[in-house]
Amino acid sequence: LTLALDTYYREESEDILANLYKTLNEVSFDADPYLHHAPQHAHAVPVPEDAHHITVPVQFQSINMRLTAPRIVGPDEITGISLRKLFKTFRRDHGVSIIYNAIFTQRRVIFVGHNLPSDEVGNMVLSACLLTSPAIPGTLQRAYPYACLTAMQFLQISGYIAGVSNPIFEQRQEWWDVLCNVATGTVKLSESYQTELSDANIQPLYAKVQSIDKILMSEIQNGLQLKYGEHYIRTMFQDYTDHIVKIALDLEVFENDNLHEHDLSVNEWRINEWKKTDS
């Protein structure tokens, strides 16, 4: 994918993407060992990997490579990317919390990476989806890992999460609510979104959300320092999101009414905003 996209950005030819689509669709992931005796003209024959993954040889643009994929992937799951990297990049100044809440409440989020490899920016977009997916179905449908000025259709999508390399996007605040600079690790709110959150009625509710998010981020940071892996950080965000969604839908089970009222109160802004979305 990285090879195809780098070539596409240089040549801007849809034939490259069509060739990638054709190549991937011709790959056979049939794990039948008898296929290892298939004729040599077969495009891709599986190579045994482990109980959870399968690896096949693939040829793309005359380059031989190996493609590894999990045997089972849910409709809202993503593999091959690192949520840990996103966390480490944007952990300063409530950065991850801002991104999380923007995606949760379906605001417009853009990751910009001027002069950075396209796959690095694209992976940040997909990693950001994991903050709420699969607990909130459909998050991936709002993701546009590789957007550019010649393909701006994503602007019509509610709550898109897009990755770009052109710095002009930073100047066009009408195109985003939250801008994440992959190179610097900074997160910026548009003036209109900042004004909205600074409203006298909203600001105290948003502050409550950030206070409980800070506890989550601290727990995750401690886990990473103890060398907990990618599965740990994904599970933390999935459980956190699932808990909030269940509160919003009145499906969560609490030990007592006080705990219920507390969690509902601190998540009031987030839940109210989420209910306005089409999630």
Image (cartoon, rainbow, N blue to C red):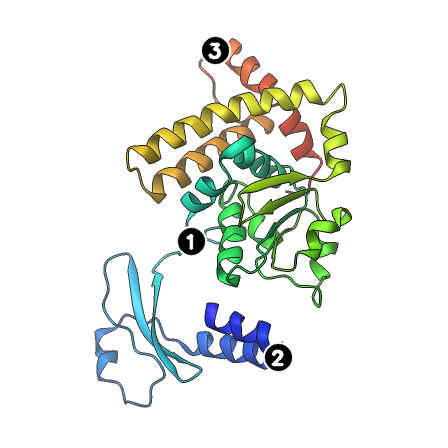
What is the spatial separation of the Cα atoms under label 1 and label 2, in whole angstroms? 26 Å
Q: Position of residue 269 (x, y in %)?
A: 66, 25
Residues at marks 2 and 3 touching, judged by CB atoms closer than 8 Å: no
Q: Position of residue 119 (x, y in %)?
A: 49, 61
Residue 63 position by quadrant: bottom left
* Residue at mark 3: 256
Give the mark nearer the N terminus: 2 vs 3: 2
At horizontal 59% and vertical 72% (from top left) the residue drawn is 9
Q: Position of residue 25 (x, y in %)?
A: 46, 75
Q: Tag 2's secondary structure?
A: loop
Identified by mark 1, the residue type is Ile
Tell whether 231 sits left or right of 156: left
Q: Tag 1's secondary structure?
A: loop
* Residue at mark 1: 81
* Residue at mark 2: 13
Give the mark nearer the N terminus: 1 vs 2: 2
Neighbour tally class for label 3: few under 14, some 14-19, many 20 plus, Cα within 10 Å? few
Neighbour tally class for label 2: few under 14, some 14-19, many 20 plus, Cα within 10 Å? few
Q: Tag 3's secondary structure?
A: loop
Quarter of the image with the C terminus is top right
Nearest to the observer: residue 155 or residue 276: 155
What is the spatial separation of the Cα atoms under label 2 and label 3, in whole angstroms? 60 Å
From this view, report whether residue 70 is shown above or below residue 12.
above
Nearest to the observer: residue 241 or residue 93: 93
The nearer-to-camera label among 2 and 3 is: 2
What is the spatial separation of the Cα atoms under label 1 and label 3, in whole angstroms? 39 Å
From this view, report whether residue 68 is shown above or below residue 35.
above
Q: Where is residue 177 in the image (x, y as percent from the top left)?
A: 70, 42
